[in-house]
Image: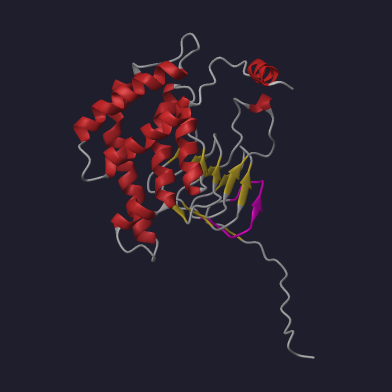
Amino acid sequence: MKIEEIISRIEEQKNLPNLNLSIKDKTEAFTHKLFHTLFDKQTPVKDNLMELGMEFEVLAKLVCWEPGSPCQDIWSDYLQMLPAILEKLNLDAQAIAKNDPAANSVEEVYLSYPGFFAIAIYRLSHEFYKFGLPLVPRLMTECAHSLTGTDINPGAKIGDSFFIDHATGVVIGETAVIEDNVKIYQGVTLGALTVDRTLRNVKRHPTIKRNVTIYANATILGGETTIGENSIIGGNVWLTKSVPANSMVSHTPQISIKNTSEK
């Protein structure tokens, strides 16, 4: 093919007028600046909030192409929520520092824990999600996903003092509900039983009650599945039905150890 034909065929396939990759880049920059504004002692809050407001105005114009979509007016209401969001995030950081013996300080949690960063971006995106802002909440959590390996849908409902240890491989679906003081470890999935577009407006993901601990690589599926409060879910457990309060659920694989040096 001649270069002209190649160009023509590529341009024919680019038929989504609102598919603008700058939306992703601008959202990632906005997300990082918002995180620094809330946590970095050296970052001037007043100046950054003004800059964030201008950046949000640009984002809103890019993503609100559907008639009736919420746009720039969201920012002033969102600002009112930031102090309460920050209070929740400080509780999350304290929960991590309190429960993880490897944490040497709360500062270490803020600076180096991928689980905290993922929770922070989830909480900041969740309020935008509730406003109905298109694209931006999901792109914010995907920014955290790409950096931490933790995939929290902005639609999930998560209570206070949430702790994700190690973080990598965690998946929390859109309609999951997690109450206060829950701890989960790497590789945990709170997912749906089936992937079906007709279930879009149905609760598809589990409910985790207060004070539950879920250990590494456990998988809990289904919108009707509830893990009762104070329960412990062991590593590698696969659950598709509810568990009563104060339960301990474990998976016991058969392990064989053979000394190969003996003949």
Instruction: Identify the image quadrant of the N terminus.
Output: top right
Depth order, front residue of 53/74? 53
Horizontal arrangement in the rendering, residue 5 relative to residue 48 (left or right):
right
Classify 196 as above or below 145. above
Up-down relation of residue 139 to residue 68 (above or below)? below
Taking the image as shown, residue 184 lies to the left or right of residue 255, namely left
Q: Residue at x 62, y 26 (%)?
A: 200
Q: Position of residue 97 (x, y in %)?
A: 34, 58
Q: Is residue 181 among the parts visible in the rendering?
A: no
Q: Residue furthest bottom?
A: 263
The boundaries of the magenta stretch are: 231-243
Q: Where residue 112 sits: x, y (%)?
A: 37, 54
Is 241 part of what is drawn in magenta?
yes
Magenta stretch, main secondary structure, is: loop
| 251 lies above or below 229 | below
Q: Name which residue lies at 74% across and 81% down.
A: 258
User: Which quadrant of the view contains residue 78?
Assistant: top left
Q: Is residue 230 above or below residue 89?
A: below
Horizontally, residue 255 falls left or right of residue 105, namely right
Q: Is residue 67 at all visible to an observer of this figure?
A: yes
Please state which of residues 28 and 248 is positioned toward the viewer in this rendering: 28
